[in-house]
Image: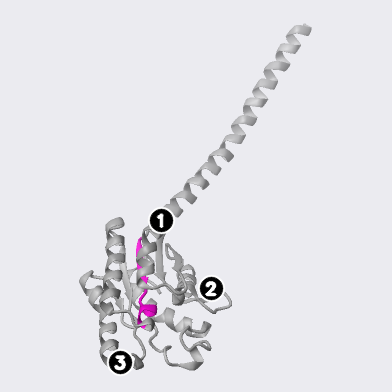
């Protein structure tokens, strides 16, 4: 009888343990589903890469996130669009410097590539022919690595004191490359900001936080048509 009682107790314990195991399974399954959903969301999120110089990097701003790529990132987040913004701006970068580092930058997946380089070339009086060659090389490398990526060119201009011939040749670099490569184009990145002391820092070149918001608007007007927007709102 004692042995029989022990057998019943052992059987009861086994059933109880089995029941506990069954109760725990749904939680494990739920956790697995949550992980799967998170991974799916991450995979569905596309990358917008801003590749540029100090204007992109946010030189002189208290918070680099206040630079125009950061302003656009906040707008995308507020609209719950499936994109993340990567700021690959380096202060002082020339088109040659950008061409030298683009391969490393493209190690991450890129769905929309936004090119903002050339301003430092212009300020240094570098030949527009050289700037064109470097920018085209950058575009070629992006297209070779990510042929399905959308491309957007941010146009630049130089002050009139550089001379009319240079000013015109430099200005033509950006639409020429954009047309050749079927890139969306922002004709002049600093439209409404360049030449306005109240919207620029003391150097007269880099936008203030307020100026950066206007620059972001200039880019957004073109960029928004390149984004997948399932809700159809901006």
Question: How crowded is the residue under tag 3: few (<14 C-alpha within 10 Å), some, or many (20+)?
Answer: few
* x 38%, y 87%: residue: 191
Q: Which mark is residue 108?
A: 1
Residue 96 lies, with reference to residue 213, above or below; the image says: above
* Disc 3 from disc 1: Cα separation: 40 Å
Considering every residue shown, the one lying at the far right of the view is 2
Which quadrant would the N terminus be assigned to in this image?
top right
Q: Which residue is mark 3?
A: 163
Labels 2 and 1 touching (C-beta < 8 A): no
Is residue 228 at least partly visible in the picture?
no
Residue at 67% from the left image edge and 25% from the top image edge: 16
Q: Are marks 3 and 1 in contact (CB under 8 Å)?
A: no
Q: Which residues are drawn in magenta?
A: 111-122
Q: Secondary structure at mark 1?
A: loop
Q: How far apart are the alpha carbons under marks 2 and 3?
A: 33 Å
> SS at mark 2?
helix
Q: Which mark is residue 64?
A: 2
Q: Residue 144 placed where, x, y %?
A: 27, 57
């Amino acid at each position: 009888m004692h042995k029989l009682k022990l057998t019943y107790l052992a059987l009861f314990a086994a059933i109880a343990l089995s029941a506990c195991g069954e109760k725990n399974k749904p939680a494990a399954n739920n956790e697995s589903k949550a992980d799967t959903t998170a991974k799916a969301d991450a995979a569905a999120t596309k990358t917008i890469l801003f590749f540029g110089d100090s204007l992109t990097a946010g030189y002189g701003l208290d918070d680099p996130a206040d630079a125009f790529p950061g302003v656009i990132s906040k707008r995308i987040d507020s609209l719950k669009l499936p994109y993340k913004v990567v700021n690959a701006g380096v202060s002082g970068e020339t088109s040659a410097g950008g061409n030298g580092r683009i391969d490393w930058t493209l190690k991450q997946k890129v769905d929309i590539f936004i090119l903002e380089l050339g301003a430092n070339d212009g300020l240094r009086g570098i030949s527009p022919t050289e700037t064109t060659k470097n920018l085209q090389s950058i575009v070629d490398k992006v297209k070779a690595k990510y042929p399905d990526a959308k491309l957007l060119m941010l146009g630049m201009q130089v002050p009139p004191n550089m001379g009319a011939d240079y000013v015109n040749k430099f200005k033509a670099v950006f639409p020429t490359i954009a047309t050749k490569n079927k890139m969306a184009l922002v004709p002049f990145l600093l439209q409404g900001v360049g030449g306005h002391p109240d919207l620029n820092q003391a150097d007269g070149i880099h936008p203030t936080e307020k100026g950066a918001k206007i620059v972001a608007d200039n880019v957004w007007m073109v960029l928004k048509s390149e984004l997948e927007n399932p809700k159809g709102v901006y």
